[in-house]
């Protein structure tokens, strides 16, 4: 019984250590993961923080400077299809939510194109520009490239 | 021709139902003819699924665009090898491949056990047939591979360019094989719980299947990492993406299982734990599939909602709760008198190795589903990126490596200070000496110092074991060193194969640490004739060359690599453009040496200025990640190699099992 108790303590300590590592790491590494609309609502509160924003590459005003590896574009909220398939139109919104994204120092992702869904990770500036550390592209509409399965 | 496919799948589903009923009723009522017919039904089911998969393959190879699947994932100009691999380029095909593998493995197991384990085999086969019912149900009703198109297109939409790569030809099948073969030990574990025959015969019977599964999970993860490294062009190989995590978690739990069953075999301990682990490993394979198909968690490898998520989640919930209920119901029968005696024992080292492995798996799980949890709890999605996984798993990996050195050498039950010293003095000195050398070489990060010291310590223990064994054989049998080495491994393949695997793990670990801490990255735009300095290398940009074919256009840059003013090689990074999918792709140029990898990405040419932009990575020791992975695979082959002594032991167990079964059958009343 005594031996059993001794091992229960060891296992409990180990489990607590792992739990501590997880909690501590969550505290220091978590970022908001928002849609364009959600980020718009929290714009002032989030200024200066690291965020992930999911949106769609808007047409127009996309610049790619190969020499400095700088990609600039805007993301907007992808329109949501309603059940009838008709797209919702936000009548009251004067200007639809959008963010300017500037990604420096990485090659343009192969899958990047107007209308593609992207996830932008970076720092949200006070002016609403996201200085992206990473631009993740995803393939629309089709179950695609899985690595695993 | 494609019309045969749906019929074959429908028939297979019926056979799967029949097999479940025949196996269960046959086993309960002791009607051996019914059990035999249940087994035959399983074989017939496999034959039907084989017909289906052959039909889909042949439709892909013949570019039969009447099939929706072929029109979506293939094209006329797609090279034949990728028409073949397009089978797993899309959802329906990959599920069909999964189901086919499941049926083939079930058939092999049915054959292996046609005379063995008469008590648990029918139930194990029934469990496997239940799994087949689920997947066949999906293929028949939810995501059908043989749906026809309304209007036959002239050409298909082509396979995603990222998948037009040879790693994609071997990575998914490896991973599926690993995933699916985990069902076999799971099915036998479940059967042991159902029948209450809870000795370790279910473990012994499926030991090779568990190792086989682990082997392919290892290769699947390795190939996936290699694919990411060679194809995605960001210089890394692992990003803690949900899809990667989905493949990594079952591997971790399977690793824990393979270690803890040794404790049960030797000490008759951890019975509940082993059953729980195999259940968890299998459930994680289902969870991985759910994760990648449901769209619940966004991934770089975007999976839009395919509608499969709820089905997988429901099935997973049913499997998990049924299995847990069985396990809880048998808890009393699973009690063992044996207990842990000392922290300084092999049992304890294995126990903590298990805790760490499962801890890592849990951390990965938690990090992966964190956005979902935070949204449910706090109403806002919060994500943790790669730094989370590094922070948690970094220290745990150190602990694991340490235990890997200690576990195989420390005495069973309890060690005295004296035999600890005798066993570990030399490896400890090697570890400390290495740490000192690394520090003197100017590397002061605590993690790197610890990691390299521990790696050297583990290498020391492995070397000591080999030396010990070889010396013993030379003295006892009088063999030469080389011969003694070969015989040592051949005669104790489980043990020394295990050491080879550990050697591979250490090398891979060193590669991972070095490449994570010391990767050098240079981005530059240059004119023709200009050069870029990267570490000891000078890269001279010589110009571009373009080529066209109907399938893909390419723009290739020529770079001459110089070192100390002498030309070493020409590297040819390129940009491709796939016509059908209107999508560019990157071809990385890679020059790999044991010391470091030179990795060149061609970002493009500015048409106005003629400047070409390159991103160059110099990654130290990453070579050893791949080499270590292959050594792990080699060690696993050694472990799996048939061993005369073990065969005899299994035969003895089987005979005993048969006798017991015979007695049970003769006893009136049954049960």
Image (cartoon, rainbow, N blue to C red):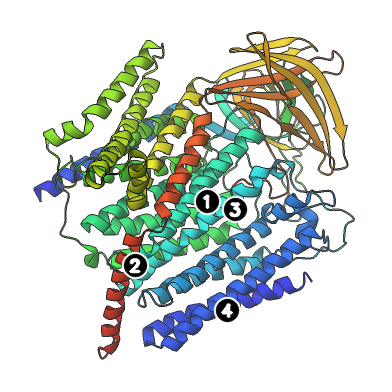
In which chain is the residue bearing label 3?
B
Tag in front: 4 or 2: 4
Of mark 1 and mark 2, the one earlier in the sequence is 1
Q: Residue B16, can we see it?
A: no
Say whether disc 4 or disc 2 marks the residue closer to the N-terminus: 4
Count how many numbered circles sit on residues in the image: 4
Nearer mark to the viewer, of 4 and 3: 3
Q: Is residue B486 left or right of residue B94?
A: left
Position in image of residue B170 (x %, y %): 62, 48
Q: Residue furthest right?
A: B154
Instruction: Kindly identify which residue carries mark 1.
Output: B288
Q: Is residue A83 above or below residue A12?
A: below
Residues marked 1 and 2, same chain: yes
For the residue carrying disc 1, how many other residues have a C-alpha within 10 Å: few (<14), some (14-19), or many (20+)?
many
| CB-based contact (under 8 Å), mark 3 and mark 1 | no
Is disc 1 on the same chain as disc 3?
yes
- Per the model, the C-alpha gap separating discs 4 and 1 is 27 Å
Q: Mark 4 points at which residue?
A: B15
Label 4 to label 3: alpha-carbon separation: 25 Å
For this rendering, which residue is in front, B205 or B637? B637
Distance in Å between CA atoms under marks 2 and 3: 32 Å
Chain bearing mark 1: B
Residue name at image x 70 percent, y 44 percent: B163
Residue B267, image x and y in percent? 21, 56
In front of the other: A31 or B579? B579
Q: Which chain carries label 4?
A: B
């Amino acid at each position: 019984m005594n031996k059993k108790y001794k091992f229960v303590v060891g296992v409990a300590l180990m489990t607590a250590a792992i739990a501590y590592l997880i909690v501590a790491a969550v505290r220091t590494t978590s970022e908001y993961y928002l849609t364009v609309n959600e980020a718009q609502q929290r714009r002032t509160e989030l200024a200066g923080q690291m965020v992930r924003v999911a949106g769609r590459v808007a047409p127009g005003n996309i610049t790619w400077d190969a020499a400095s590896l700088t990609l600039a574009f805007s993301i907007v909220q992808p329109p949501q299809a309603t059940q009838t398939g008709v797209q919702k139109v936000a009548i009251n919104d004067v200007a639809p939510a959008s963010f300017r994204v500037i990604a420096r120092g990485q090659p343009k992702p192969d899958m990047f194109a107007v209308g593609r869904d992207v996830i932008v990770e970076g720092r949200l500036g006070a002016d609403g520009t996201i200085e992206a550390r990473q631009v993740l592209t995803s393939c629309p509409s089709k179950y695609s490239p899985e690595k695993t399965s | 021709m494609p019309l045969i496919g749906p019929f074959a799948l429908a028939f297979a589903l019926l056979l799967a139902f029949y097999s479940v009923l025949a196996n269960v009723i046959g086993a309960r009522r002791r009607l051996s003819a019914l059990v035999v017919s249940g087994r035959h039904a399983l074989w017939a089911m496999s034959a039907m699924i084989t017909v289906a998969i052959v039909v889909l393959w042949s439709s892909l190879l013949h570019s039969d665009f009447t099939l929706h699947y072929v029109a979506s994932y293939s094209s006329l100009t797609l090279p034949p090898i990728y028409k073949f691999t397009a089978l797993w380029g899309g959802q329906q095909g990959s599920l069909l491949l999964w189901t086919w593998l499941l049926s083939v493995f079930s058939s092999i197991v049915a054959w292996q056990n046609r005379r063995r384990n008469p008590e648990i085999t029918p139930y194990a086969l029934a469990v496997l047939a239940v799994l087949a019912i689920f997947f066949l149900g999906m293929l028949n009703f939810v995501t059908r591979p043989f749906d026809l198109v309304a209007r036959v297109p002239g050409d298909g939409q082509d396979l995603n360019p990222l998948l037009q790569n040879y790693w994609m030809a071997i990575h998914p099948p490896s991973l599926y094989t690993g995933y699916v073969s985990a069902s076999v030990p799971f099915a036998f574990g479940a059967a042991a719980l159902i029948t209450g025959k809870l000795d370790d015969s279910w473990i012994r019977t499926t030991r090779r299947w568990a190792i086989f599964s682990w082997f392919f999970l290892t290769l699947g993860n390795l190939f996936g990492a290699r694919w990411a490294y060679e194809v995605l062009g960001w210089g890394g190989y692992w990003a803690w993406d949900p899809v990667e995590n989905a493949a990594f978690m079952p591997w971790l739990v399977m690793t824990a299982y393979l270690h803890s069953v040794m404790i049960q075999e030797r000490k008759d301990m951890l019975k509940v734990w082993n059953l729980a682990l195999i259940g968890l490993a299998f459930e994680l394979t289902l969870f991985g599939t759910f994760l990648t198909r449901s769209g619940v968690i966004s991934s770089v490898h975007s999976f839009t909602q395919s509608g499969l998520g709820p089905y997988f989640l429901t099935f997973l919930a049913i499997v998990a709760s049924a299995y847990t209920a069985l396990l809880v119901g048998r808890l009393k029968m699973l009690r063992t008198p044996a207990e842990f005696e000392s922290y300084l024992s092999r049992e304890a080292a294995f126990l903590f190795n298990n805790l760490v492995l499962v801890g890592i798996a849990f951390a990965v799980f938690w990090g992966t589903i964190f956005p979902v949890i935070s949204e449910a709890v706090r109403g806002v999605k919060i994500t943790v990126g790669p730094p989370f996984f590094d922070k948690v798993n970094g220290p745990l990996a150190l602990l694991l490596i340490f235990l890997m050195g200690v576990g195989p050498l420390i005495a069973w039950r309890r060690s005295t200070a004296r035999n600890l010293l005798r066993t570990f003095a030399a490896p400890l000195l090697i570890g400390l000496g290495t740490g000192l050398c690394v520090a003197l070489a100017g590397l002061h990060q605590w993690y790197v110092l610890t990691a390299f010291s521990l790696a050297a310590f583990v290498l020391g223990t492995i070397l000591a074991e080999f030396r010990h064994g070889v010396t013993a054989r030379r003295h006892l049998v009088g063999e030469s060193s080389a011969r003694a080495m070969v015989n040592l491994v051949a005669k104790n393949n489980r043990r020394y194969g295990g050491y080879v695997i550990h050697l591979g793990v250490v090398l891979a670990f060193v590669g991972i640490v070095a490449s994570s801490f010391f990767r050098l990255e240079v981005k530059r735009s240059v004119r023709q004739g200009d050069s870029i300095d990267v570490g000891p290398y000078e890269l001279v940009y010589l110009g571009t060359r373009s080529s066209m074919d109907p399938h893909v256009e390419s723009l290739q840059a020529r770079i001459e690599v110089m070192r100390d003013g002498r030309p070493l090689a020409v590297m040819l990074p390129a940009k491709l453009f796939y016509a059908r999918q209107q999508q560019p792709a990157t071809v990385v140029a890679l020059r790999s040496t044991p010391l470091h990898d030179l990795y060149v990405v061609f970002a493009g040419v500015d048409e106005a200025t003629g400047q070409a932009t390159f991103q160059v990575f110099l990654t130290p020791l990453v070579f050893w990640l791949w080499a270590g992975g292959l050594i792990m695979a080699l060690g696993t082959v050694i472990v799996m190699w048939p061993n005369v002594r073990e065969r005899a032991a299994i035969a003895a167990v089987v005979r005993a099992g048969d006798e017991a079964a015979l007695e049970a059958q003769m006893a009136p009343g049954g049960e």
